[in-house]
Structures are given as C-alpha cells and as structure tokens.
Image: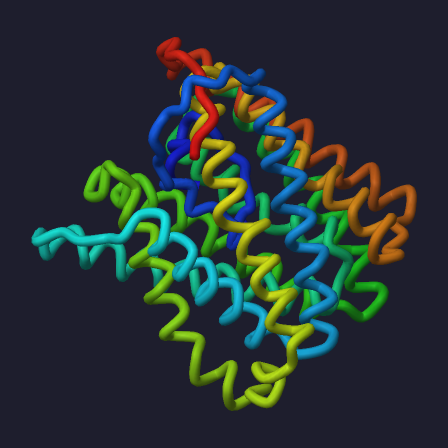
C-alpha cells in the first residue's frame, strides 16, 4: 500500500498502504534523536510485515474482510491519537475522496496478494507512483527509467501470466492506478489538513465503504478472535507505525535517500514472502524486480536534485 506526506516529487515510489500510507500523520516532537534512514527502513519492514500478515488473514477470511479490518481498526487508532474536526467543507470532501481511493487501493492490492506472491504484487503496483513522478517530464533520463521499469514489469507479468495468475496481475496493476490517485489526492489532503487529522477521516470513509462487502463475503469471520487480533496487527503495522516513523524521517532525511530506501519495498516484500510465506521466486522474477527497484531509485534521486528538502531536526514521533 501503499503517500501524500512524501510529496509527488520527493518520493515517486511507495506502499503503500494501502498500505499505504496515507502518510499524513503528524505528531508532537519528543526530542529523542534517531538516525533517519533507520526509521525509513523500520517503516518499510513494518509495511511489508503487515502485508505478509494480511496474506494469512486473506487466506482465512478473504480480501474484503481483511481490507475492512485494516481500515476500520486503523481509523480507530488514528482517532485515539488525533481526533479530527474541521469546519471547512472542502477539507472534508478531500478527506472523503481520499478515503474512497484508500478503499480501492487496499481492496485491489489485497485481492492481488491473495493470488500472486507479495513481492510480485508490490512490484506491479509501482507503475503508478513512477508514472506520477515522470509525468510531463521532458528529460531523456526519465524515459530511461520508465523503459527500465516497464521492462521489469512486463517480464514479471509474463512469468505470472504463464502460471495462470492473470487476475492477480490485473488487480495489482489496478492497485498501481489507485496508488497514483493516492499520491495526487494525498498532496491535496496534506494541504487541507496540515495537522494530518484528515487521514483518520479518510480511513473511516474507507471502512464504511468496505463494511457491507466484508459482511456479505465473510461476516462470520468478524467473530473469530484470531482474525480480529490479526486485523488489529495489520492496521498497526500498515498504518500507525509506518506513518509515524516516516513522518519523523522526512523532517531530516534528504528526498533522494528517502526515495532510494523506500524503493527497496519489492526487495523487502520478496524477503518477507520467502521467509514467512514460503513464496519462492524464479531468477527472471528477481531480475525483473531488480529492474523496477533501480528505476524507482533512479527516479527518486533525479527528482530530489530538483526538489531539495530543508534540513530540520529529526525527532521520534509519539
């Protein structure tokens, strides 16, 4: 999943979040200094660990139940941390629109990881943020990154189609489209809700939209203690923890470094998939994922030179 707080130019690549990532959560500084790159790595591991756990929930309760649990519990957690209230109607409209996008992003991604390996799904959806990052660019180097990413995605798609995972590939690509919308509308969300409270409204909207489909397709699982407990952890790993860590990191880490570290999402997804889910990939698939990682990192570094970030003190968020 699948991020607004990063900015379109600062980070053309992820999850998230759906994953996500809705990275607009802000916090009160505590003054405890921590290396910013370490926070970004921890955030990425949190997101992919949450996605790996989500696969287990999907296997038992289905993708729509999993989406609802993530959004609903995430909304509750954010409401506790930062209750939202504004009188600006346009701000509420933006938050609600972002919630619709969150529902689509999480829904398509969770259907995808229920059918194809986690690393493959994460790689496929990268086309969305990459497209946003290079849209309208006239630089030849950006065309090189696009061609490299396209080659990797096509190579990976070919291997997945050959194993009859067409539907999973399609949903992962659809998640990429929602990811692009997520970034574009997310920038509006951070302007309308500078304190980050709009994210809770958005997640609540997504939870409302997915509630009926979740109940219809697997309502009885909402009474299962294991499913509910796992849903809480998925929301924690994919929402509260990464949003808090990444926001703290973005106050200090250069955009290029941030982009490169988050571009490693497919690699972490491959590791989580292999170790915890037993999802082995072929050599051509690893090469294809590497192509997308390089393209994403290259795009991040190139755009960071055009959009430098001010140097602010780094603090760990509450």
The x and y percentages for residue 236 are 55, 52
Q: Nearer the viewer, residue 266 or 172?
A: 266
The x and y percentages for residue 48 are 67, 47
- Give the side of residue 167 with respect to residue 95, left or right: right
For the question of whether residue 141 can be seen, the reply is no
What is the residue that sits farthest to the top in this orientation?
A: 311
Identify the residue at image location x=58%, y=28%. Answer: 40
The x and y percentages for residue 238 are 56, 50
The x and y percentages for residue 306 are 40, 14
Residue 205 sits above or below residue 51 on the image: below
Q: Nearer the viewer, residue 224 or 113?
A: 224
Quadrant including the C terminus:
top left
- Give the side of residue 185 with respect to residue 240, left or right: left
User: Residue 301 appears in which quarter of the rendering?
Assistant: top right
Identify the residue at image location x=49%, y=59%. Answer: 105
Colouring scheme applied when the structure was drawn? rainbow
For the question of whether residue 260 can be seen, the reply is yes
- Give the side of residue 273 with respect to residue 48, left or right: right
Residue 242 sits above or below residue 312 on the image: below
- Give the side of residue 112 with respect to residue 155, left or right: left
Residue 235 sits above or below residue 56 on the image: above
Identify the residue at image location x=69%, y=49%. Answer: 49
Total marks in image:
0
Identify the residue at image location x=44%, y=24%. Answer: 250
């Amino acid at each position: 999943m699948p991020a607004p707080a990063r900015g379109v130019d600062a980070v053309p690549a992820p999850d998230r979040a759906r994953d996500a990532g809705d990275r607009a959560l802000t916090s009160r500084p505590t003054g405890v200094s921590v290396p910013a790159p370490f926070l970004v790595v921890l955030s990425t591991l949190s997101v992919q660990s949450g996605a790996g756990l989500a696969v287990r929930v999907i296997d038992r309760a289905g993708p729509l139940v999993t989406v609802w649990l993530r959004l609903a519990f995430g909304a509750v957690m954010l409401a506790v941390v930062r209750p939202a209230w504004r009188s600006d109607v346009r701000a509420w409209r933006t938050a609600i629109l972002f919630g619709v996008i969150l529902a689509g992003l999480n829904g398509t991604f969770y259907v995808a990881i229920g059918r194809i390996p986690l690393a493959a799904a994460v790689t496929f959806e990268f086309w969305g943020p990459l497209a946003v990052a290079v849209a309208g660019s006239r630089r030849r180097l950006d065309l090189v990154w696009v061609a490299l990413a396209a080659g990797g995605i096509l190579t990976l798609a070919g291997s997945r189609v050959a194993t009859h995972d067409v539907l999973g590939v399609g949903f992962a690509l659809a998640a990429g489209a929602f990811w692009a919308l997520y970034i574009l509308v997310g920038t509006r969300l951070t302007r309308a809700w500078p304190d980050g409270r709009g994210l809770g409204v958005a997640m609540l909207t997504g939870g409302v939209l997915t509630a009926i489909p979740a109940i219809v397709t697997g309502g009885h699982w909402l009474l299962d203690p294991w499913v509910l407990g796992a849903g809480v952890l998925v929301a924690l790993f994919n929402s509260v923890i990464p949003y808090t860590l990444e926001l703290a990191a973005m106050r200090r880490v250069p955009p290029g470094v941030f982009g490169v570290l988050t571009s490693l999402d497919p690699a972490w997804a491959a590791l989580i998939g292999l170790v915890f889910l037993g999802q082995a990939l072929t050599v051509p698939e690893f090469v294809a994922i590497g192509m997308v990682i390089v393209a994403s990192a290259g795009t991040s570094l190139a755009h960071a030179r055009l959009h430098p970030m001010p140097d602010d003190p780094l603090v760990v968020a509450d």
